[in-house]
Amino acid sequence: MPSTHNYLMPHDQKGADISESASETRQYISFTIGQEEYGVDIMAVREIKAWTDTTHLPNTPEYMRGVLNLRGVIVPIFDLRCRFGMGLTQATNMHVVVIVQVGQRMVGMLVDAVSDILTIAKDEIQQMPQMERNIDDEYLSGLVTVKDRLVALLDADLLFNQQSIENGVVLGKAALGDK
Amino acid sequence: MGLRVLAVDDSKTMRDMVGFTLRNAGHEVIEAGDGEDALGKLGNDRVDLIITDINMPRMDGIALIKELRAHHIHKSTPILVLTTESDNSKKNEGRAAGATGWIVKPFSPDKLLQVVAKVCP
Amino acid sequence: MPQEFDLNQFKVTYFEECQDLLETAEEQLSILQAQLGDVDVETLHAIFRCVHSIKGGAGAFNFTGLIEFSHILETTLDLLREGKIQPDHNLVDCLIRSNDVLGTLVHMAQKEIEPSPDIWKTIASELEKYSGLNITTSAASLNEEDVSPLLASVAGYNLTAEEEEEQGWGLFLENILPPSSQMSSEMEKDDQGWGLFGDEPEIENNTETAHCPELTKPHYRIRFVPEPHLLQFANEPLLLARELKTLGDCIAHVDVSRLPKLADIAPDVAYLSWSFDLYTDRSIADIEEVFEFVIDDCQLDIQLVDNREQIEVTSDVADSPQDEALADLAGDIQPRESTPVPRPQKEQSLSKTENKKVDMAANGNVSAPMVSSIRVELDRVDRLVNMVGELVITQSMLKQQADELANNAGLRMTQGFEELNARTRELQESVMAIRMQPVKSVFARMPRLVRELSAKLGKKIDLITSGEMTEVDKTVIEQLMDPLTHMIRNSVDHGVETPDERRAAGKPERARIYLRAEHKSGRIQIEVSDDGRGIDRDRVLAKAEEKGLIERDVEIDAQAIDNLIFTPGFSTANSVSDVSGRGVGMDVVRRNIISLGGRISVFSTPGEGARFLMSLPLTLAVLDGMIVKCGAEKYIIPLTSIIESIHPVREEIKSLMNGGTLVSVRGQYIRIVNLHHLFNLKDAITDPAESLVVIVETERYGYVGIMVDELLGQQQVVIKSLEENYDPIAGVAAATILGNGKVALILDVDGLAEMEHGAEKRRKNKSLQRQVFLTGE
């Protein structure tokens, strides 16, 4: 069963409250992929663990790195670098898997390293400029500058919503059909 | 001051509700699923009050009351029967068997406590 | 810490309970049906209790629709069990349908949908016809005026009921109060008979005027004379007096005139009586309510005293010191359970008590609680099952590591692990046993299915079930319903003939369908058989040819023809009837069963009937699997589908034009599934002659051989869902966790066969296309 105990979990869970104040802050866990830095809402993060070998799932998209056993639950791991079209991650045990809860599902994101916990006020978040990066900006909820670093905030729900996973499966099947 | 109450009903929902209400009011509640179960759980231990349903498998409330009234330990223990409004004949039967009073289902927690207070000192 | 009384917290229990009650009711109704002519009243009681309990809870949660209908149903059931109406086929049928409606209403209540009365209107009027008719006849001796209130009271709509509802507890008063004329004369008489508190002659005249009660309020004079047996109901006059006091100012007068000499006092006889002067704004009903429980065991009269005369008082119930004395007196004379066992006053009473004591003890032996059970949330059990699964995995991980240890230490450890392994298995079995349920819950729904279908089709069928108590895991139970329903439907619809046909065939008009369950070699076997016409092979054959399921003019044996009914897309019904049509047939049944790791087979004798045998694993939570290696990956093949594994020699392998490969096993060609190709695995053995071929039985493609590198061993694995966090993957049924903590995929052999088939087809199409190009069309 997924543990909700996490040393990274903030004690103050007021973030869940819906108040639209501009100064309202949220916490994000930031991680790096190559030179780029991303953030994901800390409330969605269930666990962070070092990369271990996964079990490959046949006929799935390349960025689907297989499944691993998280205390008895089978969790699929997505290679974010690959997902963003930057090629496969040559994963070692120095790499990190960030397990997030997306709706009813638990999925893992393979990233290079976790870097920080950021506290970001709503009004600090800028809208995505078009064509800024080489990833689909539909998965980003905004940009924020932290100590001169540009951090792209990921919307895990959008990134891993069922539709895009299914699309992935469809893509994989199409790839198979071509053989 | 807490009473020791034996609640007998084959419906767990009812047992839960009676149990919850009485425990909340500081009473101790022993639950039984039918008459035989009740007698088994009671044995020779005294309780301050017995609340029992009428319609139950194995041993119904009427038979239970008769047993209890014939028992030297329980003969003077107040017994309330849980009835529904259509149970008039059952109610009378319960009384004839020796019940102290009755509570009509459904009941509010307040009503239950009020009736309990009515028969327990 | 007192908690908020929130009704919602009881709803979960209630709905769980309702489910059980509905099932029990259905079961008992079936029994009742079978008992017609010789009805066991306990069956009726059991059904009544079910509906009664549902109604009780519904009342608590105020599910009005459910209350109303369950009440109507209960009324009929009550008349039945009282023997006032007699059950017949129609009535039982009506009750069965009523139980369905009840189920619907429970379901709606659960979904918090307010049901429209239309749902039960029809059936309710049918029920009322039964209950109503009877009441009119049994009440024939009464005049008409009396009948309607009686009807009303049976239906529970009488005034008393409403009053009671308001108060939440009942009253017996209206028919008990003596006429007031009588009362007043009694009052006068009693006035003189009142003794003073304590009844000591010297105190008798010591009457004094009490402190003045508030005389502005209405004054009631209440005369309360307990019957001698009042105390035997554990009612306590002192409590009544106290309660009266809560209504207003109250002055109590005790009458000890009936008190015998001390030596003659029986401890459980009420000797004292009282009169109270009560000054209160409350209604007479409120006062009556105080005496509600004792009303049948006393003389009570309550009178409003018009002229507010000055009253002489003996004691004020609560405030005066005499009150305590009263309490003491009451305590002394009328012992409650806290009083020591009274000294026997009469020989007779002693022996009586002793006898009862003996009876009680004797009864105590026989009435010890039977098998007790607790209700546990399924989640908790599932968690336990998971945890034990984890334990098994961890243990096999440890064992693996111990095996790697060289020398004696390793050996001893291995021995220890074997012992631990045995214990763990035991533990796992015990835990799995918690989820085991008798198939009864599924079987219980079949009688009605047969009844309804046979009525619809004009057939006469008896369903005979056995082995209902055979247990399988909850996961299997859930999956059993659909295939079984379908098989039964199939038998009723296709297997059993109409009564005319049966007569013509020299068979009894009533057909029989048997439904049996039993444990067989670690699996559950369920049999559905009938004495109908058997499978019509000519028709099956014609249909199969027509649908292109088989090639024409191919020699095919009887057993194979019978098995054609399992071919996808096959349905022998001439019209898509609403019975077993809907485009699904036995092929779907077979697919479902196979996906559960089960098998189904049919044996038919034309003119005599058909027999379907279905065998299923006892649980879907664990599975015995063969671990195979293909490239770098390990997979599990369910042991149930494995026939054998072979190392083919080159001569036995035949390549097909479409890129497919066959292997000859004892003269039979079997299609090879190229696992490495389908799953795109690197470093796997690609030459069938060097690989190992695991022959498995599939649903659609018969035997196929899965090509793997090697077998790694057999192991029981815990089945884990892949779809919990991801999507279905072709060729993969589920996942498990191996001893090393890694996930391994459990293969779906049917899916693999289908993939292989599809791959070959695509290749074939491609080569066809190429040919088209070559011929330069």
Image: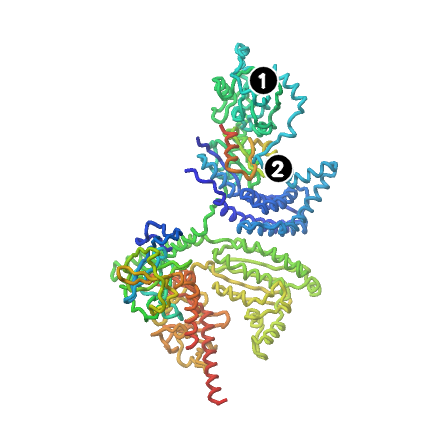
Residue at the (50%, 89%) spot, across then down: C777
Measured as percent of width and height from the top left, residue A54 is found at 34, 65
Image height of C464 relative to B28, above or below: below
Is label 1 or label 2 in front? Answer: 2
Callout 1 and callout 2 share a chain = yes
Q: Nearer the viewer, residue C106 or C510?
A: C106
Mark 1, other Cα within 10 Å: few <14 / some 14–19 / many ≥20 = few
Is residue B25 at least partly visible in the picture?
yes
Question: Which residue carries the number 2 mark?
Answer: C161
Q: Nearer the viewer, residue C762 or C411?
A: C762
Image height of A112 relative to C110, above or below: below
Please state which amino acid type lies under the numbered disc 1: Arg
Residue at the (32%, 53%) spot, across then down: A9
Measured as percent of width and height from the top left, residue A118 is found at 30, 57
Question: Which residue carries the number 1 mark?
Answer: C258
Q: Chain of mark 2?
A: C
- Mark 1 element type: loop
